[in-house]
Image (cartoon, rainbow, N blue to C red):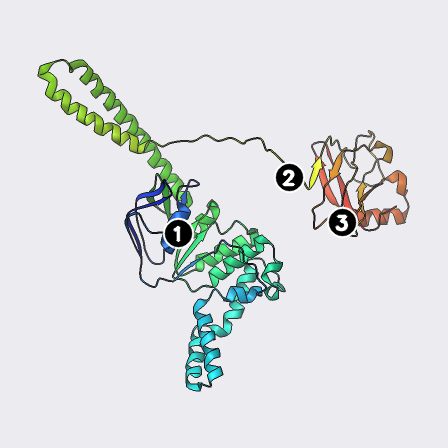
């Protein structure tokens, strides 16, 4: 189906693919792996036709239907469902022809187009698009919403759904799981296993690759190395290959050292000149073989940041005591420390309530709360509730139990405490 023969592709001065050779058969599911920057995305761009090889050959069937995920975020008022349906280009073309035939009153043509529309599954297309949206994590009310109302991550999911809607013979996916939660990832995994076309998948998720692909293309040094099996099988084979390569390089170096010793020993003897020249040629060949199989490493480090973003929650000098199993039995040692709360927003929430089994005089500032810009509290105040403030009556116990059920649990190395947000502070 696809053939690369000694293909070379460069971007600027950098050669990303060099003497790349591979054959991809129809119906295969192939994982493409390699270091970051090795040329995985470049290979997909070559297959999409966005790049041409600088040397060598690349061939594909004419009119090959290729699907891929657009990397640009859509920004329009178009409803989500219609945007996903736009991925089925052939169906949309028939719809446009139907509309023109209806306007012109061409009944015969319209009837034939309706037959074509039915053959393409047009009457079930909206259901299929809605299933794609639901599988990728959209709510039941989302298909009617405008694209610009969604977050960037959900818009990328919309791009993925549109690519899956496309009637493709070859599907190219470059890190499709980046914006997916676990449920959507598992759904996509099952969908790709059932996909009947040819799949080229770039991913760093080894479990995702293991469940889908049957062959691995590994890019190293600009060349393509094919390994049968999934990613786990590739790791085993690649490790064995690397071990054999290291042994071969070590053997070549020993041979090179032996030949170099012979040359140094007999270089000045005229009777050995012919043998010396022969061994010098052999030595040059041995060094070139060793250079091909020697892997180059790299070093990296985290540079100190110039500026840090504002955190959602920052904890400092936290020393929480163990909360007693019952609200009304305080621990002997007073060791719990809670924090002052700082929040700014235009939302109507007004307090953060911190519950503990210890009296209020045991608290000291320890937590600072930075709310998010769009989902946070307004003028938040702290309310510390303890057994000494609310007493031990049935009403207080019921109030604390209800708040406890809706609270968040925070644990440190020495114990746990709970807090929750409330419009009406519990006194």
- Of the numbered discs in the image, which one, if any, rests on residue 323? none
Around disc 1, counting alpha carbons within 10 Å, would you say few (fewer than 14), some (14 to 19), or many (20 or more)?
some
User: Can you identify the residue that label 2 sits on?
Assistant: 309
Apparent side of residue 60 relative to residue 350 in the rendered image (left or right): left
Cβ–Cβ under 8 Å for marks 1 and 2:
no
Residue 387 lies, in percent from the top left, at: 87, 40
Apparent side of residue 366 relative to residue 300 in the rendered image (left or right): right
At horizontal 25% and vertical 20% (from top left) the residue drawn is: 257
Q: Sequence order check: which comes first, mark 1 or mark 2?
A: 1
Around disc 3, counting alpha carbons within 10 Å, would you say few (fewer than 14), some (14 to 19), or many (20 or more)?
few
User: Can you identify the residue that label 1 sits on?
Assistant: 45
Q: Sequence order check: which comes first, mark 3 or mark 2?
A: 2
Question: Considering depth in this image, is 345 or 213 the residue closer to the camera?
Answer: 345
User: Can you identify the residue that label 3 sits on?
Assistant: 406
Q: Is residue 381 above or below residue 256?
A: below
At horizontal 67% and vertical 40% (from top left) the residue drawn is: 310
At horizontal 72% and vertical 39% (from top left) the residue drawn is: 410
**Tag in front: 3 or 1:** 1
Q: Secondary structure at mark 3?
A: loop
Cβ–Cβ under 8 Å for marks 3 and 2:
no
Question: Considering depth in this image, is 404 or 283 the residue closer to the camera?
Answer: 283
Q: Sequence order check: which comes first, mark 3 or mark 1?
A: 1
């Amino acid at each position: 189906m696809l053939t690369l023969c000694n293909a070379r592709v460069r971007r600027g001065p950098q050669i990303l693919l060099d003497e790349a050779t591979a054959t991809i058969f129809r119906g295969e599911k192939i994982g493409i792996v390699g270091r970051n920057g090795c040329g995985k995305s470049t290979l997909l761009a070559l297959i999409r036709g966005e790049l041409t090889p600088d040397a060598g050959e690349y061939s594909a069937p004419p009119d090959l239907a290729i699907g891929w995920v657009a990397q640009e975020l859509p920004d329009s008022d178009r409803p989500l469902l219609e945007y996903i349906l736009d991925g089925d280009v052939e169906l949309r073309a028939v719809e446009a022809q139907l509309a023109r035939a209806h306007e012109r009153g061409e009944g015969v043509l319209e009837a034939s187009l309706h037959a074509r529309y039915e053959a393409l599954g047009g009457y079930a297309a909206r259901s299929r698009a809605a299933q794609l949206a639901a599988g990728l994590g959209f709510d039941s009310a989302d298909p009617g919403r405008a694209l610009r109302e969604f977050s960037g991550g959900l818009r990328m999911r919309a791009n993925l759904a549109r690519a899956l809607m496309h009637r493709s013979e070859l599907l190219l996916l470059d890190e499709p799981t980046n914006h997916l939660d676990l449920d959507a990832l598992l759904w996509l995994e099952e969908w790709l296993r059932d996909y009947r076309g040819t799949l080229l998948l770039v991913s760093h998720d080894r479990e995702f690759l293991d469940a889908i692909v049957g062959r691995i293309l590994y890019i190293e040094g600009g060349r393509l190395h094919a390994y049968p099996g999934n990613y786990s099988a590739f790791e085993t084979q690649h490790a064995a290959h690397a071990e054999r390569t290291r042994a071969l390089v070590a053997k070549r170096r020993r041979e090179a050292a032996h030949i170099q010793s012979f040359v140094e020993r007999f270089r000045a003897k005229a009777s050995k000149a012919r043998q010396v020249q022969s061994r010098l040629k052999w030595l040059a060949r041995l060094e070139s073989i060793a250079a091909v199989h020697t892997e180059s490493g790299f070093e990296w480090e985290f540079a100190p940041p110039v500026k840090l973003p504002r955190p959602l929650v920052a904890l400092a000098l936290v020393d929480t005591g163990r909360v007693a199993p019952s609200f009304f039995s305080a621990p002997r040692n007073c060791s719990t420390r809670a924090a002052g709360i700082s929040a700014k927003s235009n939302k109507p929430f007004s307090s953060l309530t911190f519950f503990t089994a210890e009296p209020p005089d045991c608290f000291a500032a320890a937590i600072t709360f930075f709310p998010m810009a769009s989902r946070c509290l307004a003028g938040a105040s702290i309310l510390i509730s303890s057994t000494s403030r609310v007493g031990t009556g049935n009403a207080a116990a019921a109030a604390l139990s209800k708040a406890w059920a809706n609270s968040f649990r925070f644990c440190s190395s020495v114990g746990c405490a709970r807090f929750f947000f409330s419009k009406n502070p519990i006194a």
